[in-house]
Image (cartoon, coloured by chain):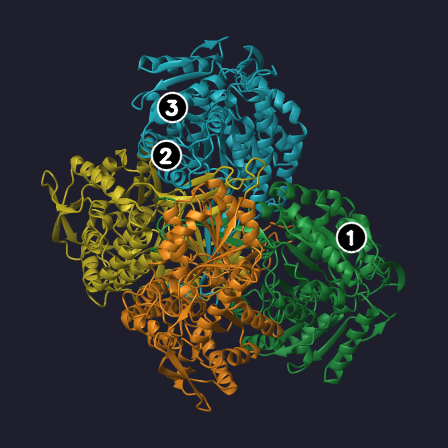
Chain colours: A orange, B green, C cyan, D yellow
Amino acid sequence: MQMIIGGNYVDASDKAVKDVLDPGTMEVIETIPMATEEDVKMAVAAAKEGQKVWEKIPLHTRIDILRKFHDLFIGEKDAFVELAAKEMGKTVGHAEAEVLNAASLIEHFCDAARTLKGESYPAGDHYSNEADMMITVREPHGVVACILPFNFPFELFCHKVVPALLMGNAVVIKPATETPLCNLKMAGLLLEAGVEPKAVNFITGSGGKVGSWITANKDVDAVTFTGSTAVGTEIAKKCAENLTRVSLELGGNDALIVLEDADMDYAVAEVIGGRAYCSGQVCCANKRILVQNSIKGEFTEKLIEALKKEKPGNQFDPESTYGPQVSEKAAIEVEGYIEETIKQGGKLLLGGKRFDRTFIEPTVIEVTKDMDVALDMEIFGPVWPIIGFDTIEEACEISNASMYGLSGGVITNDINKGMHIAKTMEAGCCVVNGGGCYRAPGQPFGGYKMSGIGAEGGTYTLEEMSQVKSIVLRNAYK
Amino acid sequence: MQMIIGGNYVDASDKAVKDVLDPGTMEVIETIPMATEEDVKMAVAAAKEGQKVWEKIPLHTRIDILRKFHDLFIGEKDAFVELAAKEMGKTVGHAEAEVLNAASLIEHFCDAARTLKGESYPAGDHYSNEADMMITVREPHGVVACILPFNFPFELFCHKVVPALLMGNAVVIKPATETPLCNLKMAGLLLEAGVEPKAVNFITGSGGKVGSWITANKDVDAVTFTGSTAVGTEIAKKCAENLTRVSLELGGNDALIVLEDADMDYAVAEVIGGRAYCSGQVCCANKRILVQNSIKGEFTEKLIEALKKEKPGNQFDPESTYGPQVSEKAAIEVEGYIEETIKQGGKLLLGGKRFDRTFIEPTVIEVTKDMDVALDMEIFGPVWPIIGFDTIEEACEISNASMYGLSGGVITNDINKGMHIAKTMEAGCCVVNGGGCYRAPGQPFGGYKMSGIGAEGGTYTLEEMSQVKSIVLRNAYK
Amino acid sequence: MQMIIGGNYVDASDKAVKDVLDPGTMEVIETIPMATEEDVKMAVAAAKEGQKVWEKIPLHTRIDILRKFHDLFIGEKDAFVELAAKEMGKTVGHAEAEVLNAASLIEHFCDAARTLKGESYPAGDHYSNEADMMITVREPHGVVACILPFNFPFELFCHKVVPALLMGNAVVIKPATETPLCNLKMAGLLLEAGVEPKAVNFITGSGGKVGSWITANKDVDAVTFTGSTAVGTEIAKKCAENLTRVSLELGGNDALIVLEDADMDYAVAEVIGGRAYCSGQVCCANKRILVQNSIKGEFTEKLIEALKKEKPGNQFDPESTYGPQVSEKAAIEVEGYIEETIKQGGKLLLGGKRFDRTFIEPTVIEVTKDMDVALDMEIFGPVWPIIGFDTIEEACEISNASMYGLSGGVITNDINKGMHIAKTMEAGCCVVNGGGCYRAPGQPFGGYKMSGIGAEGGTYTLEEMSQVKSIVLRNAYK
Amino acid sequence: MQMIIGGNYVDASDKAVKDVLDPGTMEVIETIPMATEEDVKMAVAAAKEGQKVWEKIPLHTRIDILRKFHDLFIGEKDAFVELAAKEMGKTVGHAEAEVLNAASLIEHFCDAARTLKGESYPAGDHYSNEADMMITVREPHGVVACILPFNFPFELFCHKVVPALLMGNAVVIKPATETPLCNLKMAGLLLEAGVEPKAVNFITGSGGKVGSWITANKDVDAVTFTGSTAVGTEIAKKCAENLTRVSLELGGNDALIVLEDADMDYAVAEVIGGRAYCSGQVCCANKRILVQNSIKGEFTEKLIEALKKEKPGNQFDPESTYGPQVSEKAAIEVEGYIEETIKQGGKLLLGGKRFDRTFIEPTVIEVTKDMDVALDMEIFGPVWPIIGFDTIEEACEISNASMYGLSGGVITNDINKGMHIAKTMEAGCCVVNGGGCYRAPGQPFGGYKMSGIGAEGGTYTLEEMSQVKSIVLRNAYK
């Protein structure tokens, strides 16, 4: 495959490439260019130029073009599903769900963009502006770099690239090295739909290098990134040099609290659903299962029983309930975390093994609240650490002891317990009576603490992808 | 004077102090503690503790307390005016104006805090949330560090400390080294009004050191800073390490564009008013005067004539129209910038001299658009660089060539010209038919490009001083 | 007492007066003028004139004046409490609660008025407005007639008169014939606080006559009324003639649904609290008690036991838990409704008698869902009709069978049951896990169906008390 | 043609019909049923039933269905254009413009419906709700009657029917007797798109009778009407009986003020464009031309010169610049108003004649501000009354002397003059530097005074087509 610079498909300037593998089979399915610093500079320069053209396209036309993109995208649904399963390893079912969500996102952003109002302030709210008209309008940042993760190539593309373009920005897209193919194809559809060619740039290569070239470039006005906290922090530091605006959706170690009044079957289903999805490679998966001690035994038994029915396997096998991890490296990391947790005293109750290089068995470990996995160790795999607690306050304390604060949930049908926990939990979201993995299109999704900066979704993204300007007509009403 | 840690007045732990001078006379008027790293740690720790108490105080009580603070503050208006003139050097009239603005700000934030609503989302806007209730609420960050500049000790205190407290945060306040006295007195009134004592902390000392100790402290959850771009960028970098939230109101080199249709007398008055105010030490002063060439001669003549009536002098002398610069160092810097501009070819038309150590004459220099002063050199003093231009497009280009983008203005009565410039100007605000120096209480005031990150004012500040949380009642309506 | 026309205290032009009684003793405490049609015309004419002056007072000054009114009002709290108890018959405790609520309302409206923003629309959201700036601003209606009920003279004055004035309208106030004294005193404080005198007009007399003269007057631009559905409908019809804007908060027959999972003691307390308050003379009192049949016996027993401790008595007697009805006529009406309900088959379980002319015993009647009291008969007194039901759906059906739809509640701690009922209930408000009588300052309080038109509270009232204007700067950005 | 009741095409129950004419030729093109009271009752009953089904369809599905309606509608654009020209008499060009606007409206409402948020209130904004969660949601009214005018069959259908359905209401549509055909076809497409059949009802017949049967029906929950002030007032009165919600967009006599600084050619073009459009049959046409006396002579000359180029003629003739009036009766009425104006002293400067039964010549009359046409006489035809004025204040007085207050405009490029007039004009909209006839999709379009009640457009309509409910989770956070 080739990159896109200024609307043209190109190789890396030094022709270097890297393989893209199918993690289900470890076969090479494609190669991607390894961009040079020069390539990145050219992409940013093209974007800067293209942005001047694109921002002058009226809003309603930009919306029409993005809606056309929606239609083209959904029109190729089957091909996209297959490609995503191929490069990322998620099952066909998971890939299909993601395409539908992504399509829904495009619509949502188009809707929200049309109706995103600014403000008009009452004259005379202060003694010195009695005849002034003051309003706000929103303006594009300019060039927005969209740095994408591997786990949701469709959704994150739509969460970042689509609103950036709707608000009049040009984009430089950097996909995850493991999953560039769907993203490239989507970028191509943007061109086909009619986005100003120079406003669409797509660069592949080493995450660390390309990322740092992008963030160091003074002509990049904003960076939106979803990925690990470690990388996100690096990006934030680099962006600070030029005061480049930055939105970060980072790691999480989300607590799902199961109270003793919970419907046990519902709880088990939610706990599994939120964690097996995409082989556990979800930022807002329920990664820590906090169970009230009075029901812990029973709950754990039921969970294990249910998990025994899970079938990890090749993503194209219709029997598979989840697929491989995205790469062998990723699977080895999960395996390592499991071992480390056992070493710290965790009691392995189910699974625990890596197999066929990239697959992880459904794994249940009983742990205590002082172990790393109950704090800041984020495991990106199908692992369910069970932590017992006695009181609601204890559950909140365990939940809040992590440096992360992305999302979380509580399974209870009791209004007061549910709302009290929702209020107390130090996280960007709390789902009452539902599992994790919750992200609605319009929701301001963003982490507290080390889980990120900013909130993404609906009008929140449109605001992050633009900057406010106040216009004053001084003494206008005089 | 002493600092405040956990509600108690204390010296620096090593008893070190530094003098505070009256810049009008260069006499020592007070000493301030030079905080040690240990002092900063203690202040942050106290704040963290105090915050847990303060956030539980109901919103309406917090508002009542801040309103009491308002009454105490305005009740000591005369003392505050004198103190500000003394330590900062602004004239009594300028100090009085600031006190009134600050009082108005407190009211505005109290009003806005009571009525700051979250959102409730329509169920079923997406296919997977058909029975979900989703809402947003706002929660405090925790400990907010407020790092204040010297030029508007009252207003900036109110822009930062008041909303931080209203939203349930504790504060660690770091005043400018030159102007700690008014701020200390205000912090004292917060305690008197009933803010949880440990939630109010006030640290003095070396800007660089204290600033870096504060931003490096993991228990500081957010930093709000107004000051220079150089320092702001350093703060941003340090905050990035821990993903500490940061709001920055930084430097500017605001263009004021005078079109040929302008009412000449009005234009001259606005151009002077926005720049002589506080001896030109205002971030959003009109620092670059862009005059259409067809009227440049006449305008410059009238400007010089009017400026000859300005009387820089001791801030307590009722004849003085503006006072000294805040310090000798500051005055020398202005002098240096004037000399540098002349060296670059600027034609000195009026003034240009420093006198009595801290005073600068009203200075007019004719310059060209390629000189530093027309680009990124921000002069914090009573200096009017005149830049000619022919067309509106040229005026916009000159205006946008700066790395700064704080604010700006245009003097014209023509709707289209005014609005076109307002739209084109790369700045957080554009005042049509008015000078610079415009900042209304509810206005989202914030810079584009290197002028800052975030927007401060009214509900915008309340949002910056808090973080959004979404609460989902999953399947609630089922 | 005298009326206020154009800022002056005056008698009726024909000197006619009527007695004001203390319903606790039936002694005459004052007389009020019975306004003539001429008086009403003069009041409206004065208001029209005064409005032109008042709307030009800047918003911040209007807020300052209304805040001064707040301070004057709260400064005379004790006198107001006594006067309200005297003329209306509510106990001193109930009167005190009302004064505090009313004061809170004034603050809320002042806060909300300062921060009530209009909108600024994105240019180009449509193909024909690509360079247009469009904004909205709010403008006063002009003359607003405020027709007040007897039950909450302080709160309703503040819900209507205060926001009307804040938005720049002049007012013509018509108090209830039974309770004019507190309202007159409040109107006087408005003048004292500095409201433009001609903008404050206060007319007493026959509700029917004065009401119809007011609504027929073409110079009355808006009418806001709280009272019975019968009168409200008449007002609506008359207002329709001149398209006079009308806001109506009318009758209710609010259901409070007690589910079998309810905490029984809490439920009993809420059921009593919401109905004994002000002797049951509250529009949003819980007037129909729907109890799940599985707990009906036990609940009713506990309710009766608790109600036996209620002590209706003279409003100034500290032992009294509630006072008389507002008038003998009102008490007779309640008595009649009780008798009618028994006649229809209701089973009297407690009380049922009127005594000392104006007092009603705490009354519990077991009824069925087809009786008038379970449908459209609104009893304004301390009467608890108990209706059994089996399923949640049945409870909703009973609740929705009434022509009224003001408010309602459900006592349960179950999220799903609570939210399902809240969604299904045809009423302007549903309180989950709480009794009726709920009205927060910022809440949009308004009835569905025959319970009214419009929603009152916070910004909703400010919007009702003003009209939107859109201002377009056509092709401004070109 | 037939009506639609409960999704079925039906005749009037008594088979009565009436002719529909082509006003350009006076030929009969169709017949419509004359509904009986029984028919109306059946339609409302069906709607009530259908609404229960339709409101349960999730929002996203309702949006999908209305988007499908959009596609079907635009897919038959040519047929719609021809049909509208045929039945209404507007030129093909005018009909085409309307179709495009209508399609844009559908999109706008779909976008706005998805993103219409409710509110979540801060706990503790008041002393008694410290642990309460309070939110608002919006609910359908139930059955909404949409009574449509003849002049914009496409746009008004979309302004009323589409948002009513999006918000979960069922509709009973009553088209204008002259122009039922386009509306019927559109209603059919709603069914085809998938709206619940019983939720779509379409009734033709005598405006007066059907209107009064609809408004008298207790099962009609809301009425939205665009038409004359006389009829609107009748509807308001009838709706008041049952407190049926009512939105009225009524007559106007909009002032367009031409100031002496205006660009003369632009002013003439706007003045003509806003008035010749659809033969002057537009509620917000510029019906009174107020010209500053200093330029009145020159302006009038240029206007007459330009109007001589207008070519009224058959709507299908490509040469025609405007078509016939909608009916002979309408044309005779215009003719009568012209004669009456001349009788009152108006000086006829151009045209003045009716020809070919339904056509009116472009007519210019010089009038004075005391004549009916300068006050409350609304002429629905291509007539330009010119009224001179000296000062801006005089222009505002003339403008505001009318009982109407729909919209208005001012031609000037001067910010202060433009904004001052915009603020002073008693009208729902003022266009600065543009003519009348302005209505953007998201704009709150609604009249002051006798021009209507409510504001229609974008989110404003969605709010009018629904009612707010507050849901309180009492003590939820405790």
Instruction: Mark 2 and mark 3 in contact? Answer it, CB < 8 Å.
Output: no
Discs 1 and 3 lie in a common subunit: no
Q: Nearer the viewer, mark 2 or mark 3?
A: 3
Q: Identify whether B379 is placed above or below D420.
A: below
Front position in the image: B440 or A337: A337
Distance CA(mark 2)–CA(mark 3):
49 Å
Image quadrant where residue C71 sits: top right
Q: Secondary structure at mark 1?
A: strand
Distance CA(mark 1)–CA(mark 3):
61 Å
How many residues crowd mark 1 within 10 Å: few (<14), some (14–19), many (20+)? many
Circle 1: residue type: Ile
Query: Mark number for residue B4?
Result: 1
Q: Nearer the viewer, mark 2 or mark 1?
A: 1
Circle 2: residue type: Glu
Task: Give x and y (percent) for residue A323.
Answer: 35, 68
Front position in the image: B422 or B219: B219
The residue to which callout 2 is attached is: C241
Task: Give x and y (percent) for residue D135.
Answer: 46, 44
Residue B465 horizontal side relative to residue D199, left or right: right
Q: Residue furthest bottom?
A: A14
Residue C214 horizontal side relative to residue D14, left or right: right
Q: Identify whether B37 is placed above or below D336.
A: below
Instruction: Mark 1 and mark 3 in contact? Answer it, CB < 8 Å.
Output: no
Instruction: Tell me the subunit letter for badge 1.
Output: B
Q: Secondary structure at mark 2?
A: helix
Distance CA(mark 2)–CA(mark 1):
67 Å
Discs 2 and 3 lie in a common subunit: yes
Circle 3: residue type: Lys
The residue to which callout 3 is attached is: C296
Residue D157 horizontal side relative to residue C53, left or right: left
